Image (cartoon, grey):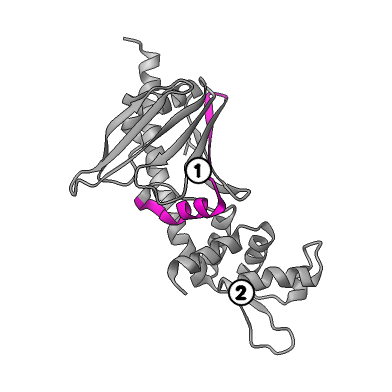
Amino acid sequence: MRHGQLKLTTSGDRDLVMTRVFDAPRKLVYDAHTKPELVRQWLLGPPGWTMPVCEMDVRVGGKYRWVWRHDTNGTEMGMGGVYREVKAPERLVSTERFDDAWYPGESLNTLVLVEQGGRTTLTQTGRYESREARDAVIKSGMEKGVAASYDRLDDVLAATATLR
Amino acid sequence: MQVTHRLDAIFAALADPTRRAIIARLASGQASVTELAEPFAMSQPAISKHLKVLERAGLISRGREAQRRPRQLEAKRLEEADKWLERYRRLWEGNYQRLDALLEELKTKERKPR
């Protein structure tokens, strides 16, 4: 496999951190996160969802608006926020708030891209307003599109599985 | 306990590196408090505190052996927590696999500009 495995960790009380390697230069990975026509091709969540609204004004103070719709039952889920830092092609900081929020307040998302030998390591950090808010996101699972994992729990579970 | 409360306790218990290490150790078999304290530069009371948190979350239990009271892993509880994590992994891995495919396309386009 040329791409890396998705790694999920928590950091401190309020952060969720995702790391993943992509077999592409970071300019392309950055484009895929900042150009609406590219974003709506991959940021879709579970099968059956499309992204009919994908508006992004990528500059400091600019807004973005995303809406997903379920093909068959028509359920919609929307969110949006404001860009706080824009530093192509390495760093993007934005706020995030869901229309139908299930966690208090908003989160601050930081995307960092580091390129090495033509491959790009993506680190996406979500900082929530409180530990309770972050843990609510964790528990929301797939349905709401965001959640988290804990450091090395994978290994622990793998070790447990081999015992049986 | 309700499912969400139970998950709260599980996730809170697993948020600590020492407790994760204890879980990892117990995954390879039951152990006494003394044995569990060994690899950590920690007093037994400190370890006992961590064990209490894990016990309350239902992640470990005490064995029958009267003298040692070895702790053992409750694998079912871990699986419960993992169900949530697995959903999450699937979701984002799905997104990122689509992104992999998209990046391949973009790379090809860059190599052969129209």
Mark seen at residue A160: none
Vertical arrangement, residue A144 with respect to residue B33, above or below: above
Vertical arrangement, residue B63 with respect to residue A107, above or below: below
The reply, left or right, for residue A153 in relation to residue A48 is right
- Judging by the rendered image, the residue that carries numbered circle 1 is A5
Mark seen at residue B55: 2
Residue A84 shows in this picture: yes
The magenta region covers A116-143
Q: Residue at x 33, y 27 (%)?
A: A55
What is the x, y in percent for residue A99?
35, 42
Viewer-proximal residue among B32 and A124: A124
Residue B79 shows in this picture: no
What is the x, y in percent for residue A145?
38, 47
Residue A140 belongs to magenta span? yes
Q: Give the image quarter of residue A35.
A: top left
Residue A64 belongs to magenta span? no
What is the x, y in percent for residue B35?
76, 72
Q: Residues within 10 Å of mark 2 (few under 14, many from 20)?
A: many
